[in-house]
Image (tube, rainbow, N blue to C red):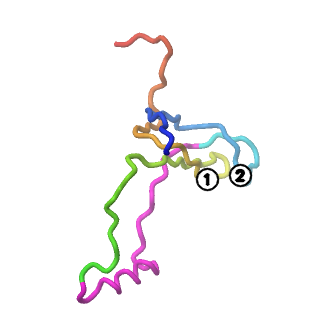
Amino acid sequence: MGRRQSVKMVNIPKGRNTYCKGKCKKHTPHKVSQYKKGKESSSAQGRRRYDMKQSGFGGQTKPIFHKKAKTTKKIVLKLECSKCKAKRLMPLKRCKHFELGGDKKVKGGAVY
């Protein structure tokens, strides 16, 4: 049985002071951004093999995945050191709503 997690709004600041694994080897300010997948290369071996298999007669040769079960994706942050420009990725938990550098919630603040 799967364990249900509470899915809520996640708000992350655009800067954070954290350990740098690069040249610094100490806590430094990091710039935070959301990781995005790069453009697929048309010359990659898997793409060339797939294109060769698809060419000619015979229709679709490999299965196309349709039974999507997940409704969320794991959020991955890209941290860039402001001193040595070293980058590292930091995965977070699953969430439906993700915000980067949004307004902070004030406890007991007036609602307008």
Q: Residue at x 52, y 38 (%)?
A: 14
Q: Which residues are magenta?
A: 31-58
- Place of residue 107 in the rendered image (x, y in percent of width and height, measured from the top left): 50, 15
- Place of residue 88 in the rendered image (x, y in percent of width and height, measured from the top left): 61, 53
Q: Is residue 88 magenta?
A: no
Observer-nearest of 90 and 26: 90
- Place of residue 110 in the rendered image (x, y in percent of width and height, measured from the top left): 41, 10
Residue closest to the far bottom? 56
Residue closest to the far right? 25
For badge 1, the amino acid type reads: Arg
The vertical placement of 93 against 110, above or below, is below
Q: Secondary structure at mark 1?
A: strand
Observer-nearest of 12 and 5: 5
Residue 88 bears which disc, if any?
Answer: 1
Q: Is residue 34 magenta?
A: yes
- Place of residue 59 in the rendered image (x, y in percent of width and height, measured from the top left): 24, 81
Observer-nearest of 3 and 71: 3
Q: Residue at x 33, y 59 (%)?
A: 67
Q: Residues within 10 Å of mark 2 (few under 14, many from 20)?
A: few
**Image quadrant containing the C terminus:** top left
| Left or right: 44 as drawn, with respect to 31 | left
Q: Secondary structure at mark 2?
A: loop
- Disc 2: which residue: 21
